[in-house]
Image: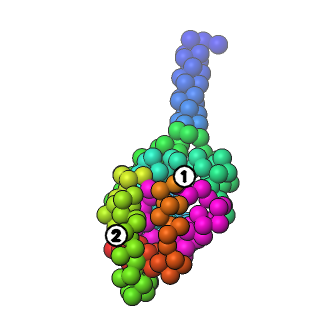
Amino acid sequence: MGCNKKALVALIGSVFMAGASQVLADPSALMMANTCAGCHGTEGKSVGPASPNLAGISEAYFIDSMNAFKEGTRPATIMDRIAKGYSESQIESMAGYFASLPVYKASVPHDAGKAQMGADVYDKGCAKCHDENGALADDDAGILAGQWLPWLKYSMADFQSGHREMPKKMKKAVKKLSDDEIEAVLHFFASQK
């Protein structure tokens, strides 16, 4: 083989290898986040009542949630299986993407009377951990403001049944509440825009 042919083969090989490494590289955060859109909506803005909004979620809360799904310590209908498909670096990448978005509060149908009652419940027992009416992502307690009411109810049911571990402070606060008060505070969170 002449010098030119060897150079050509080497060039083709290096182009192929460069392309292969690009294909084998981790997908972008946006590409991975787009796979979440089927349930959590484009840019983390859920349109379905059983899936939470992810836009604006804190990185730490997203990572903790995904790892809990992966480990089976947080109940899920499908997220436990999905989370197992992502590496730690991919989860961190998606966490950064969703955290970079502004918090999204859906326009959720709710009972205004219950939401009014729930405002008092919130002020007395929830405000310490769920700042800004449940809209502050940095408190690492998850965003509750503007979440879909069915999802809020499913989450509370998981906590109350013991399927999901309730933080000690939350357990103490929830123990003092009646079923009507719990229902009201969920309507309060759903009412936030």
Residue 138 versus residue 113: which sits nearer the camera? 113
**Amino acid of disc 2:** Asp
Where residue 80 sits, quadrant-wise, is bottom right
Residue tagged by mark 1? 65
| Residue depicted at x 52% and y 54% | 168
Which quarter of the rendering shows the C terminus? bottom left
What number is the disc on residue 123? 2
In magenta segment, residue 25: no
Classify mark 2: residues with Cα within 10 Å, few (<14), some (14-19) or many (20+). few
Q: Residue furthest left?
A: 132
Q: Is residue 2 visible?
A: yes
What is the secondary structure assignment of the residue under circle 1? Answer: helix
| Residue depicted at x 47% and y 78% | 181
Q: Which residues are magenta?
A: 141-167
What is the secondary structure assignment of the residue under circle 2? Answer: helix
| Residue depicted at x 65% and y 66% | 161
Classify mark 1: residues with Cα within 10 Å, few (<14), some (14-19) or many (20+). some
**Amino acid of disc 1:** Ser
Q: Earlier in the sequence, mark 2 or mark 1?
A: 1
Which quarter of the rendering shows the N terminus? top right
The spot of residue 27 in percent (x, y) is 52, 44
Count the numbered circles shown. Answer: 2
Q: From the viewer's perspective, is residue 86 above or below residue 33?
A: above
The spot of residue 50 in percent (x, y) is 56, 72
